[in-house]
Amino acid sequence: MEIKLINLTKVFVDKTKKETRAVDNFNITIPSGKLVGLLGPSGCGKSTTLFMIAGLHDPTDGRIFFGEDDVTRLSPDKRGIGLVFQNYALYPHMTVRQNIMFPLENLQVERNEALKETQAIANLVGIGNLLDRKPAQLSGGQQQRVAIARALVKKPRVLLLDEPLSNLDARLRLQMREEIKRIQRETGITTIFVTHDQEEAMSISDEIIIMNFGVEMQKGKPQDIYNHPDNLFVAKFLGNPPINTFEGEIKGNYLYFEGEKLFPKKAPNGIYHVGIRPEDFKVNDVKEGVKVNTETMEVIGRDTMIRFNAGEHQVRALVESETVVGKKEVYLTVRDDKIHLFDYESEIALRKIQDLSPEELEKARAEKRIEKQKFAEAQAIREEKTRKQRRPKKSKKESE
Ligand SMILES: Nc1ncnc2c1ncn2[C@@H]1O[C@H](COP(=O)(O)OP(=O)(O)OP(=O)(O)O)[C@@H](O)[C@H]1O
Ligand SMILES: [Mg+2]
């Protein structure tokens, strides 16, 4: 079932009347039967969005549709949602069977039917043989499966997962994310998966929505977003090792950095934010491009990471090991379409800028100025907090 958020907004007001726009005019469509990753840094409004879809928070403004139904004012139990949180809070005194069956008892499903459903769903998530155990007798991954089974047993129309894997160790996370993908495919249930881990989102999602400061930054297929980021934020947020970014200049279809001519790049003359992913550098034999010495390289199996300085900047290039082994210096090039250019002020990708009218561009630039100011304020608050925490408490004597 398709989920549609229209102008969805949530403003929290604290005791001092200070407003936080946790979600700001959010418009998205989650296609039916797909697994959509909601990705963004801490505090960007992911959980708030999910809680509004679940009915646990009332939106300040906007509407939520499940298919044709407007569910904006519907109570959570009438929405047909299954919810799994980071702290999946199983009932410790109940067996796995009782934990999974609990929502069915609430719905007064006949007991034999409920037992049958419980067994089927437990089999689906791979814990069919653990039904008589108590949660304390399970591993973290098994407990997480119980929580997912409990969310699925009511046959919800929508499955909402809020950082469901963050309590698990790295290996288990990997295994569980494949499991979630399998379960979602087998049930075909429309799923929203919230995470701040870009690799997790990229690997699990049919589509990704990237948020920052309560607004959408980009949505699309993971690989499309990765290859064609709409703005500098998205470019920097996706990728490990991260994209190299610097301020560069285009002159006569060449990219320059601090006066040094780097690579050919077809674009209008001007100053830009430039992004080049480490893996997009290629070693070439014809001595074209940037000459770097390979003293500081790190062989990581098949790949080698070369670090070199461009002005004050350290640049990382990830190349195939066999192209650099035994060489003292190499020449690196980058294909034209792998050099990402962003408007200097608005930080929007050049290819998007070209579609904007002058008014739209000015508006985007003004919005970016506001966002930068917001970011600086948030940063100042965080720094103030850490300063306060670090400051040793005055002893009684001193304060007298
Ligand atoms: N109940 C609340 N009252 C006031 N402010 C809140 C409340 N819940 C969330 N916020 C604020 O709204 C913003 C978005 O919070 P939210 O929990 O949605 O972030 P998130 O993207 O889920 O972050 P995380 O990755 O850390 O879980 C934050 O600035 C947060 O402090
Ligand atoms: Mg959250």
Image (cartoon, rainbow, N blue to C red):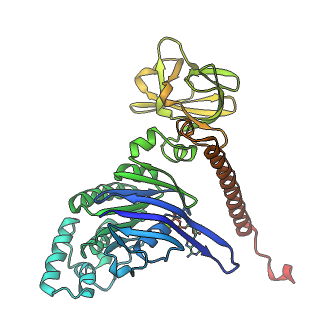
Identify which residue, 86 or 336, lies in the foreground.
336
Expressed as whole percent of the image width and height from the top left, the position of residue 222 reads 40, 46
Which quarter shows the N terminus? bottom left
**Which residue is rendered at x = 47% and y = 39% of the image?**
228
Regarding residue 318, the answer to whether it shows in the image is no
Above or below residue 234? Residue 140 is: below
Expressed as whole percent of the image width and height from the top left, the position of residue 94 reads 28, 84
Regarding residue 201, the answer to whether it shows in the image is yes
Identify which residue, 349 or 363, lies in the foreground.
363
Q: Quadrant of ligand 1?
A: bottom right
Above or below residue 335? Residue 382 is: below
Which quarter shows the C terminus? bottom right
Expressed as whole percent of the image width and height from the top left, the position of residue 189 reads 27, 63
**Which residue is rendered at x = 55% and y = 61% of the image?**
214
Dividing the picture into quarters, in which one does residue 356 lie?
top right
Q: Is residue 39 left or right of residue 315?
A: left
Above or below residue 34? Residue 103 is: below
Identify which residue, 100 or 356, lies in the foreground.
356
Expressed as whole percent of the image width and height from the top left, the position of residue 85 reads 40, 70
Q: Residue furthest right?
A: 400
**Which residue is rendered at x = 74% and y = 69% of the image?**
388
